Each structure stands twice: as structure tokens, then as C-alpha cells.
Image (cartoon, grey):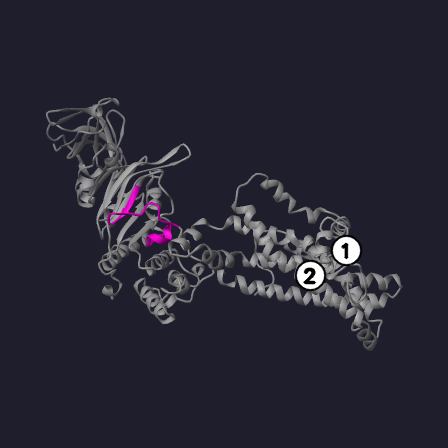
Amino acid sequence: MASRHRQGGEALSITVANVTKRFGTFTALDDASLEISAGRLVALLGPSGSGKTTLLRIIAGLEFADSGSIRFDGQDISDRAVGERRVGFVFQHYALFRHMTVFENVAFGLRVRPRGQRPTRQQIRDRVGDLLDLIQLRSQAGRYPSQLSGGQRQRVALARALAVEPRVLLLDEPFGALDAKVRLELRRWLRQLHDDVGVTSVFVTHDQEEALEVADQVAVMNQGRIVQVGTPDEVYDHPASSFVYNFLGNVNLFHGRIDNGTAHIHQDATGDLIFARPHALEITRRPQGPNHFRATTKHINAAGPLVKVEVITEWGAPVHVEMPQERFRDLALNKGEEVFIVPRDLAVFAATHEDLSFERCVT
Amino acid sequence: MAFRRRSIIPGFGLTFGFTVLYLCLIVLIPLSATVFETSKLGWHQFWHIVTAPRAVASYELSFGASLAGALINFIFGILVAWVLVRYAFPARRILDSLVDLPFALPTAVAGIALTTIYAQNGWLGRPLASLGVHVAFTRLGIVVALTFIGLPFVVRTVQPILQDLDRELEEAAASLGAGRWQTFARVLFPAILPAALTGVALAFARGVGEYGSVIFIAGNMPMRTEITPLLIVTKLEQFDYAGATAIAVVMLVVSFVLLLGINLLQKWSSAPSG
């Protein structure tokens, strides 16, 4: 099955070179450069307004850059129209043709080919049938988009994009409009599909979990710039800036000063930025070692694999802590109790060097 | 299925009763009066009147010219709506409000204006006459008048649909390799077709009933340029009330059947999206 859909070594690399795009006075992309190797699944991750969708649309040819270039396998295609680039584009709201059945939607790209290149009826039927098998919707071939669920529509949109054997697959917030459970299933399915089909793929998301779970490579974007590119491990463990660290997961922010690898937390908002992930803070009943501070428990949410506790520090700041259920049971915590917080892992960004120096303090 | 279901919207009984009464008073009773008046004639007499060559010629003209006008508006109404929605240009708003003019203008004014322009010595009539095309006082003139008064219907029904069409649909079609024409024919046109057909139905219905603007430009020659509403008026002026209503009944039935047909067509063309 899988081999039938493989794009037969056609996977190609994408180069985004110094692309700038303005809409009026708003700079959507500011000198963005990105190298995507053949056959990779890459996530463009960033908050809304960071330029990620604009970049995707420029790669697709739905939008054109003011300056800079897009290259496929080294070939400059900046001036080519979307129809000539052979890209598959999956829209956030699917953009399915409402008056066509699932079958006709998927077949569309084959039917509109110039007469000489158009497959025969039988070939179209076979190809669409294969794709419907791939998205597990063959039984729904005769239905209309309005009769399908959100997840099914998204899969039809994907099959429609794949039908034209694209050299690049581009997905704009592919799971943005779906509910949590379907989202989770579909992103695993997308990962599997990418491994089967092997086409170079780029997807846009604002959900860091989605990017880290699905992608081979994550490009983090902020204010029209690409601020970091790396594997999910790299960007998570070695964030290039406080923005990336902050964006990639829940954090507690402290201010303070670093002295010989020891963080001194200030009680006012001055000094370096010190971050701690909720799971890197430990709650103890008794003070342990020299590094700890006093706090009072405020909220406890024990639903789920991790227990989430919100505490108020002795200087009045809220801090979030996560711990496994077992640890929570051992502690037998209650609301309003006085406890000690021991930081296990802190990330420090020196305020003076504009986020450039990052060091890790393990106490 | 119960006729009345529990609902949080109050007043169903009262408003339903009023709606039925109102429709009876305004629509059904006058219409049934025509049928009643006609029934004074015997079947044979009725048949004789409604199949008289002069009457048949007027039906052909009325329905034919209305259909022609509606179909012209189908094509050019979509075009006008397209231009008004898709392009920003100076004076777009003025052009947009110009579309409603045939609605607002007293039909007699439209008739006189069209006749003046298309008459043998009119602005358009003279050059056209030198080409051998005669508009005023011919069937072509009737089509022109019915096209004029039907224009707003198609434009105004298609315009909101075009406005709401998702740009992403066109982008999706383009990304799949469709050319501009293919995108229009396969993606956009099917989306606006149901609305356009509604517009055509309205323009057609208006055309069949149109009197004021047509009688000036038509010339009103029996058998050639006499529309059915005029024939009815002529019969009334001769105090032939039964004959007038007999022809009115034919108009009523044909209009009803055609509207039903167009509604079915519309249902068929919009069914897939439901």
C-alpha cells in the first residue's frame, strides 16, 4: 500500500532565502531564511501574527514576497504561480468544494489537467480509490462535505492535495478547527502518512505540543522572523531565547542574578530572567539544602497523570508546580499549607545580553 | 409528525392564523375570483377564447420574450454582479445603485425612454436602422424592455453569494492546477448557479406581468407585437369581462407551472450542498 503512494524519490528540498513581506505598514515577514531538507516534516511554530502562515503561502505561491526568493531543489521558483509549483496545499478550513462529492473533490486536480496529461477515467478512478483507502474514507466517496465530520473533511482535503502528486505538501493549521481528541488522533495519523508518502511537508501551527510531537524539525517564529530552527529536542532543551523557552511550554518566571552557577532570586522584577518549568520545581515539607523558598499552596488540581499545584511565594507571586500522582500521595498536600519549593532545573537569560546568554543551573 | 411542536417562540397559533388569512385576502381570493368569473363561460366557449390565434400569438410573445430577457439577464447579470463584487474602481457605488434604477423607475417612464432612444430617429434607433436592425415597435424591442426591467433581479440575488464566496476555494482550485476558466466553470459557477436561477425566475415572472414599459415600445400590432396583458386590457375595454378573465386564467396557470418548474430546477441545482 504505502509504496504505491511513495512519490518515487521526488521529494525535494525547499530554500527560503531572505524573504520579506509587508502588508501596508505591517511587516509580516522580516528577512526570513529557512532550509528544509528533502522528505522532512517541518513545523512553522509561532504565536498568531508571527508570519508563519504568510511564509507558508509564499512557499505555495499564493502570496509573493516583496524581496528574497524561494527555491525548490536549488531552482528559483519565486515568480511561478501556484499552479506551476506542484504543491499540495491544505487549508485551515479545508476549502472543500461543497457541490462535489468526496470522490469528485479528490479527483478535481486530475480532471483539470491539460488534455494531453489528463489520466483516463479508469486511472482517475483507481488513483482516487487508492487515496480514499489511504484516508480510510472509501465508503464515504459519494457523500458531500457537509455530511462529514471535521476530521473527515480534513482528511479529504489532504487526499485532494495528494492527488496531484505534489512535490511539496503544505498544511495551514491543519488541526486548528478540530476538537482535542480528533486533533490528537489526526496528528499521529499525519505523521504516519508522511512516513508512508515521503513528500517534503511543512505545516503551520501555534500549538507547541503539536509541533514537538509531529515534526522532524521545528522553526520557531516571532514577529516575522525565524528565531530558531532545530529538532524538537534541540529547541526544547536548548532554546535560543527567552521567547522560545517561554513559547515551548508552561513556565514560571523569576528575576534575579547568577553568581558562579547559583541563581539568586530577587523579589522584585529586576535582574536576569530566570525560568523554571512547572515539573522542574519540587515541593517539600522540610527545607532541603541551601536552595529553596517558602510558599503556601493555593489550588490543587489532581485530575490527570500530573497533579498541578499553584502556590503563592513568600513574596506574593504565584508559581505553578507539577508532580506525578505518587509524589502527590506521599506528600499528602492540602490547600493552604506552608511548603518549601526546591528548584531542580532553571533556565537563565541574562537581561543585559538581549537573551543571548543561556545557561542552565541545576541545583 | 405533529403539526405543532413545543417551541420557545410564542404566538404560533395567532401568527399562523393571521398569515393564512392575509394570504387568502391578498392572493387567493382575487385569484379565485378570476377562475370564478371564467366559470360563467362554458367549457367550449372558454376553449374557443383561449385558443384563438390572436391569444396564442400573444402567449408565445409574452412568455418567449420574458424568457429571452431573463436569459440575457442570467448571463449579463452575473457579469455585472461579478464586476461590482470583485473589482474596486472609482464610481463603483454609483454603478451599484444604478442597478436598482429599473426597480425604482415608473415603468411608463422606462417605456417612453426606451421608445425615444430606439425609435427610427432616436440616438440608438437611427444607427441600428441603418444596419437594418429595427428595435422599436418590434418583438426585439419587447425583449429589450423586459431585459431592462429584469436586470436588478439577477444582480441582486447573485451579488451576496459572490461576496460570501470563500477566497480559499479559488486558491484551492489554483493550487490543484486549475486555470482561471476551469476555476470559474467548475468551482465558482456551480456555487452561484442556484442564486442566479432564483434571479432568473424573478426576472421572468416580472417580465410576464410587465405592462407599462412594453406597450410603448411594442407597437401593439395584433398577432405580431401584442403581449398577453395588453390583450386582456383590450378585452376589458370592450366589456368582454369573461373573455379577459379566461385569458388571465391561462396566464395564471402557465406562470404557476413555470415557477414550479424553476423551483424544481433550483432545488436540483442546490441539492448537493445540503
Q: Is residue B8 visible?
A: no
> Which residues are the magenta region?
A69-92
Q: Nearer the viewer, residue A108 or B35?
A: A108
Q: Nearer the viewer, residue A298 or B151?
A: B151
Amino acid tagged 1? Ile
The x and y percentages for residue A316 are: 27, 26
Q: Residue at x 59, y 66 (%)?
A: B264
Examine the rendered structure and indicate whether residue B207 appears above or below residue A323: below
Q: Residue furthest front?
A: B130
Examine the rendered structure and indicate whether residue A101 appears above or below residue A287: below
Q: Does the CB distance between marks 1 and 2 fall below 8 Å?
A: no
| Element at label 1 | helix
Question: Is A85 in the magenta?
Answer: yes
Q: Nearer the viewer, residue A302 or A159?
A: A159
Q: Residue at x 59, y 39 (%)?
A: B91
Chain that bears disc 1: B
Density class for disc 2 (Cα within 10 Å; few <14, some 14-19, many ≥20) is many
Pointer 1 and pointer 2 on the same chain: yes
Q: Is residue B264 visible?
A: yes
Task: Return the mark for residue B66.
Answer: 2
Quick one: quadrant of the N terminus of chain B?
A: bottom right
Examine the rendered structure and indicate whether residue A290 appears above or below residue A280: above
Q: Which residue is mark 1?
A: B217
Question: Which corner quadrant of the image does residue B145 belong to?
Answer: bottom right
